[in-house]
Amino acid sequence: MTENAPHRVETSRKTIRVLDALREHGSSSVTFLARELDMNKSTVHNHLSTLEAEKFVVRDGTDYDLSLRLLGFGGYVQHRHPLYQVAKREVHRLASQTGELANLMVEEYGQGVYLASEQGERAVDLDIYPGLRRPLHAIGLGKAILAHLPPERVDDIIDEHGLPAETDQTITDRAELDAQLATVRDRGYAVDNEELIRGLRCVGAPIIAKDGTVLGAISVSQPVSRMNNERFTDEVPDIVQSAANVIELHANH
Amino acid sequence: MTENAPHRVETSRKTIRVLDALREHGSSSVTFLARELDMNKSTVHNHLSTLEAEKFVVRDGTDYDLSLRLLGFGGYVQHRHPLYQVAKREVHRLASQTGELANLMVEEYGQGVYLASEQGERAVDLDIYPGLRRPLHAIGLGKAILAHLPPERVDDIIDEHGLPAETDQTITDRAELDAQLATVRDRGYAVDNEELIRGLRCVGAPIIAKDGTVLGAISVSQPVSRMNNERFTDEVPDIVQSAANVIELHANH
DNA sequence: ACAGCTGTTCTACTCAATGGAACAAACTAT
DNA sequence: ATAGTTTGTTCCATTGAGTAGAACAGCTGT
């Protein structure tokens, strides 16, 4: 055992590394993966054979690729997620009402995970899909969530993930983040002003359960060109917050 | 090795069995899974610890459950699927245009896999989600695909999966299936008249690449009460087929 | 035809997964 | 309270299984 991590199955970990590599590099050959993962060719072959027999990967000639069986797991996890069930329609409505990009996010393992993403008619085409993870501090959705997590939880998360810069607008200073989170709590919504992607503005509102815990957040993203200051500070926040409120009502029965 | 299946990693297979069990039974404890899988308690514990360290499962007190990391894999697989990319908008349009349930399906490992599923305003609420697998012969989508697969492929699929009955309307006779598939090829679309679920009718149209291979199928499902004979034989087939045609155009550049 | 790639198979070795027993912690019931 | 049951977890010896390396076969291009 390389580290003092007890009771772990090293072999399964290798299989997971193979899956991760396939996700990172797309369709790959045995030798490529062996080089990439610094594993023996025959070892990689054994793991891929196993994954193929279990239908987690498909082979196309000499290359292996992730199969739709993984979508089965993912779709299932999404489908039965309590927040997704109550928020799905509202995300949809938000996207068609604004014509822009509407997203739903929850926190897991200290990261933001998109639960749903829907494009309206004229929405920007970001590479966002359900299950994608993003750092919480760099996006409106994430700050809406962070603002309503217990302070010690926020400490833990920042200890683990830090405050990496995504653009030159990203908040990288803890004090500044805390100030912003206070503002978010104050006015009830969070913004992201080109902090993740240049030229993109987001407005996110937290979804809060009746016991005060934050369930997630919902947002609208659009180009700066279509979100002038008035829309950015008044209209869009209103729309997003009312969507969040509707979801809260559904969530609290 | 229990069977003469060479070059397989038995340990990773066990991990996969744990994942499958979690999907089947939902949130579960160590001892429950150990009983269910006929594995030793400590073995299950080791596998779950590994999966937790790799963030494939989350624990809530004493119970373990599938995590959103699986949604990451699933969402990725869906997002970069070539048919999904070109068909996504059309599924969306079909759902809002008809107000009913629109689905997109592809074939993998001889089964039908939903790639997308979108509910219109008044759509029935079936438990369909991306990644869900269904037998091809029992649904309109599946028959649209089967009708355009190479005959030997169809033989293989039926050899492997048979023709299990889902309702008393399901086709279970090979000759009858072949006849229906000929009809599907003839008129360009397939129907499902309460063959999967009582009271539900579907119309599915194949999506065919320029080289003649079938890429998948798209459908509309609605209650019999809202799909009388005229709609069932004329209107809906027209709408679905034209959606399929649009997708074909996008797919062929 | 040859050289340099592949992916795959085979086998010996040894490392690591396993299962059983022992443990502590959390509940239940008496 | 206390004893009894059930939980998750830990430890450890055993042996079964994963691994690495070499050898093989199939392919591609020169």
Image (tube, coloured by chain):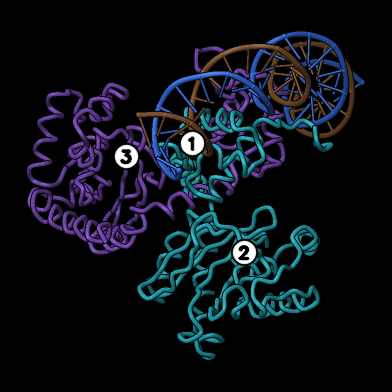
Chain colours: A purple, B cyan, C blue, D brown
Q: Which residue is mark 3?
A: A107
- Three-letter code, disc 2: Ile
How far apart in space, not on screen, are marks 1 and 3 (Cα)? 15 Å
Q: Quadrant of residue B176?
A: bottom right
Q: Residue at x 50, y 40 (%)?
A: B29
Mark toward the start of the polypeptide (1 vs 2): 1
Q: Residue at x 54, y 67 (%)?
A: B218
Q: Are marks 1 and 3 on the same chain?
A: no
Disc 1 is placed on an element classified as loop
Q: Position of residue A40 (x, y in %)?
A: 68, 19
How far apart in space, not on screen, are marks 1 and 2 (Cα)? 37 Å
Relative to B192, B72 lies left or right: left
- Three-letter code, disc 3: Glu
Mark 1 and mark 3 in contact? Answer it, CB < 8 Å: no
- Of labels 1 and 2, the one closer to you: 1
| Callout 2: chain | B
